[in-house]
Image (cartoon, rainbow, N blue to C red):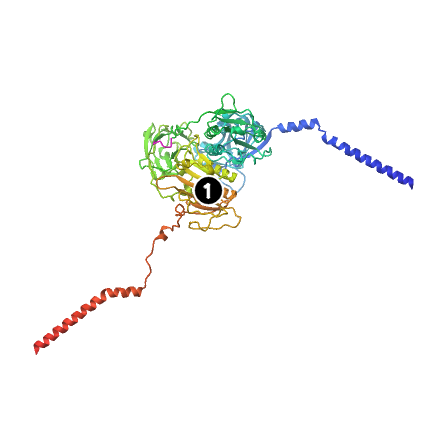
């Protein structure tokens, strides 16, 4: 018994020792790293990655049919900034060919043996391959090429993949042919991913890349409580992003405190802060060097690589210099000399705007010579701008100087001119017009409006031999850069203060140069007001005529300079009660808000709605100031940050373009109308309802009153006649006696 107990005790102690021994060795085994495995993992990280891109993902929204004898289709795209293609690339063209010589049969087998034509593929102007199609029906063609033909993103460039169908062989046999390219076609290649060294000379790459296959999110970062200069610089940069990308580049404005520094999400950053904040821990954590310096009233533009990867742009300077740095960035005038990543801006001089010129050549508008060739370059356009408050006179003309090939079939060729999408004129071509001739076209002034206007030129070029490919050597038309737009302006007819509607945004604010007549007034209560103002500034920038330094103004409401807002278009952003003067006569006297920042029953509007308790509501209101000026007042309001976001997203919604007051309760959920009393504070009914109708009266009473007018005189006349007759009768009786 004792021995058994002793053996059990020894066994338990041994088991405990073994357990402790195993527990002590476990940390050592966990910390051990096989050097071979580590090297393998490092090698795998550097291995090229394979990607398959569909034509649909590259912008082909539907199947594209290329009809004979010659047709082309082009895809334009850009690689991400960190991709370096390697090895061979493969194009898998999925297509459906049709040759009219092939008679359909009851069988499903495709018929082959005939020559339908040649299918050529070009990449960035280089011929990749030519395939002769001899089979109808659905098929897949595989083409290989060196991936070095793919170019990396650069300023003003992109990759162009062009597919050309040449069915002239079928045409000469009196046969029709066509090839339909499917969006399911793919482009396969390998790439190595790394952050390649860039300089400021690449700007706006990598922050703005047109038609990027994998867009990288862009964050516009500034301090949570920005100064007045930081506020203005941030909105200038936001407008510049819209100007440089045409409104296509998306960005998010965040505060430095809320910015999440994570490597899981790829993101580029543009940091806007004064140089005095450069030494703060938050900025140093982003990877900015502390030795960046500039002189007094000088700006700094610095390209750096954040600690999270990708790319960063630092826009800084003192209170005056940061504005100059932002203006240079907004106008795409960033250039580096010497040090490739830093630029010092000492002065920014306003550019001479061409928007107010009466006579503008194509060269003045930045277009130059326009050459039309078949089939890709048959449609080209030029933009010109009319300042707000001005209108084109009826004697506006376009002196078009053209020349063209004499090998054209004039019955099937011509040149059409459209103005803002409406046909304006169609020109006939002949041998007399082939050698530098001038056409004076009258531009309908009613089609010209304030803001951006587009003249579109559409050429139809066909040769006499329909089977001869109309290539640029035989079918071409040239519009000279000396062609002159003559747009004399006159003062627009002044309207009432309610004549402005949301559809006038942003064109109605384009009366100045570089947005110098636009002032943002922001409430200081929430950072969301600045985010909303950034979206509006981005839309204003996208509507500008050309890349020019922007000079818009932005102030906090408690720091408003009356002299600044007295002569400019004003945009209010914030909660209604944050603006103490909102209900005054010079702004929106019809709008009265309660303590919840929602419309009060005292508002002098045609309709007043009451939202549910706690609901997020946004409000939009726009008006002119008076009949002597074309200045505009736009209010983007909300009872919460979400409500303000709803309102700013609805500004450009076509559904509210004819309204001057809008209530927004959700994404795309709004109600708007044209309120006649929004600027007067009085409820004004529409004209049809305001006309006073005559008061209703009793028909019997009206008849009695009418009777009194003529019955009494008639009765009196009859009585007089009766008395006269009686008198005559009595006289006759007396004479007889």
Report if residue 681 is visible in the image: yes
The answer to whether 110 is drawn above or below residue 40 in the figure is: below
Find residue 194 and report its horizontal and vertical position in percent.
Answer: 58, 28
Q: Nearer the viewer, residue 145 or 249?
A: 249
393 left or right of 235? left
Give the position of the C terminus as an image quadrant. bottom left
Find residue 683 and report its horizontal and vertical position in percent.
Answer: 40, 50
Q: On the image, which quarter does residue 428 sit in?
A: top left
Q: Main secondary structure of the magenta part?
A: loop
Give the position of the N terminus as an image quadrant. top right
User: Badge 1, how many Cα within 10 Å: few under 14, some, many 20+?
Assistant: some
Find residue 347 and report its horizontal and vertical position in percent.
Answer: 44, 25
Number of marks? 1
Report if residue 113 is visible in the image: no
Which residue does the image show at 64% across and 27% down from the upper left?
43
Q: On the image, which quarter does residue 54 sit in?
A: top right
Q: On the image, which quarter does residue 635 sit in?
A: top left
Which residue does the image show at 69% across and 26% down from the upper left?
36
Which residue in the structure is indicated by mark 1?
579
| Magenta residue check for 357 | yes
| Magenta residue check for 96 | no
Find residue 215 and report its horizontal and vertical position in percent.
Answer: 53, 34
User: Tag 1's secondary structure?
Assistant: loop
Instruction: Name, please, the residue furthest toward the top.
Output: 338
Q: Over which residues does the magenta segment extend?
A: 354-358
Q: Nearer the viewer, residue 485 or 533?
A: 533
């Amino acid at each position: 018994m004792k021995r058994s107990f002793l053996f059990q005790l020894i066994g338990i102690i041994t088991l405990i020792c073994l357990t402790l021994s195993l527990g002590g060795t476990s940390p050592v085994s966990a910390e051990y790293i096989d050097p071979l495995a580590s090297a393998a993992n490092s090698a795998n990280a550097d291995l090229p990655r394979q990607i398959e891109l569909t034509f649909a993902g590259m912008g082909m929204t539907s199947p594209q049919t290329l009809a004979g004898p010659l047709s082309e289709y082009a895809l334009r795209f850009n690689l991400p900034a960190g991709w370096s293609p390697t090895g061979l690339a493969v194009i898998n063209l999925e297509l459906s060919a049709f040759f009219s010589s092939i008679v359909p049969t009851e069988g499903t087998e495709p018929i082959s043996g005939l020559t339908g034509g040649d299918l050529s593929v070009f990449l960035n102007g280089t011929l990749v391959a030519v395939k002769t199609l001899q089979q109808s029906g659905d098929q897949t063609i595989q083409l290989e090429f060196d991936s070095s033909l793919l170019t990396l993103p650069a300023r003003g460039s992109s990759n162009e993949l062009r597919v050309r169908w040449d069915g002239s062989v079928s045409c000469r046999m009196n046969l029709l042919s066509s090839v339909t390219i499917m969006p399911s076609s793919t482009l396969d290649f390998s790439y190595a991913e790394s952050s390649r060294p860039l300089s400021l000379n690449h700007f706006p790459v990598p922050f703005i890349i047109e038609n990027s296959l994998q867009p990288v999110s862009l964050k516009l970062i500034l301090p949570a409580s920005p100064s007045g200069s930081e506020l203005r610089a941030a909105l200038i940069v936001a407008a510049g992003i819209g100007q440089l990308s045409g409104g296509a580049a998306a960005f998010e404005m965040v505060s430095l405190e809320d910015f999440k520094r994570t490597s899981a999400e790829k993101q580029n950053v543009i940091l806007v802060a004064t140089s005095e904040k450069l030494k703060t821990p938050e900025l140093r954590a982003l990877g900015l060097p502390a030795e960046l310096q500039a002189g007094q009233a000088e700006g700094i533009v610095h390209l750096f690589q954040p600690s999270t990867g990708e790319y960063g742009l630092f826009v800084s300077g003192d209170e005056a210099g940061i504005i100059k740095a932002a203006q240079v960035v907004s106008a795409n005038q960033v250039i580096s000399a010497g040090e490739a990543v830093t630029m010092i801006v000492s002065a920014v001089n306003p550019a001479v705007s061409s928007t107010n010129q009466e006579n503008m050549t194509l060269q003045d508008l930045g277009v130059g010579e326009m050459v039309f060739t078949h089939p890709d370059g048959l449609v080209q356009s030029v933009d010109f701008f009319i300042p707000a408050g001005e209108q084109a006179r009826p004697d506006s003309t376009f002196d078009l100087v053209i020349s063209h090939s004499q090998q054209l079939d004039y019955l099937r060729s011509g040149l059409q001119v459209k103005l803002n999408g409406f046909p304006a004129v169609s020109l006939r071509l002949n041998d007399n017009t082939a050698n530098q001739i001038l056409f004076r076209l009258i531009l309908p002034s009613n089609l010209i409006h304030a803001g951006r206007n587009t003249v579109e030129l559409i050429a139809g070029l066909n040769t006499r031999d329909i089977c001869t490919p109309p290539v640029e050597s035989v079918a071409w038309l040239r519009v000279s850069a000396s062609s002159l737009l003559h747009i004399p302006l006159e003062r627009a007819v002044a309207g009432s203060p309610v004549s402005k509607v949301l559809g006038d945004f942003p064109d109605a604010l384009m009366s100045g140069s570089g947005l110098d007549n636009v002032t943002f007034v922001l409430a200081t209560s929430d950072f969301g007001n600045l985010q909303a103002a950034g979206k509006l500034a981005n839309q204003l920038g996208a509507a500008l005529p050309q890349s020019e330094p922007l000079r818009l103004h932005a102030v906090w409401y408690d720091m408003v300079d009356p002299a600044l807002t007295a002569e400019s278009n004003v945009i209010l952003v914030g909660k209604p009660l944050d603006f103490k003067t909102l209900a005054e006569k010079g702004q929106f006297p019809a709008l009265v808000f309660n303590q919840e920042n929602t419309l009060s029953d005292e508002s002098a509007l045609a309709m007043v709605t009451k939202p549910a308790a706690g609901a997020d509501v946004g409000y939009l209101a726009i008006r002119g100031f008076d009949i002597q000026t074309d200045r505009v007042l736009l209010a983007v309001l909300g009872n919460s940050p979400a409500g303000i976001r709803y309102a700013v997203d609805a500004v450009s919604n076509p559904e509210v373009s004819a309204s001057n007051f809008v209530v927004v309760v959700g994404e795309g959920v709004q109600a708007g109308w044209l309120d006649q009393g929004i600027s007067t504070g009085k409820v004004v009914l529409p004209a049809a309802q305001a006309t006073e109708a005559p008061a209703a009266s009793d028909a019997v009473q009206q008849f009695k009153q009418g009777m009194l007018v003529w019955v009494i005189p008639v009765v009196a006349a009859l009585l007089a006649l009766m008395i006269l007759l009686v008198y005559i009768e009595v006289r006759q009786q007396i004479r007889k006696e």
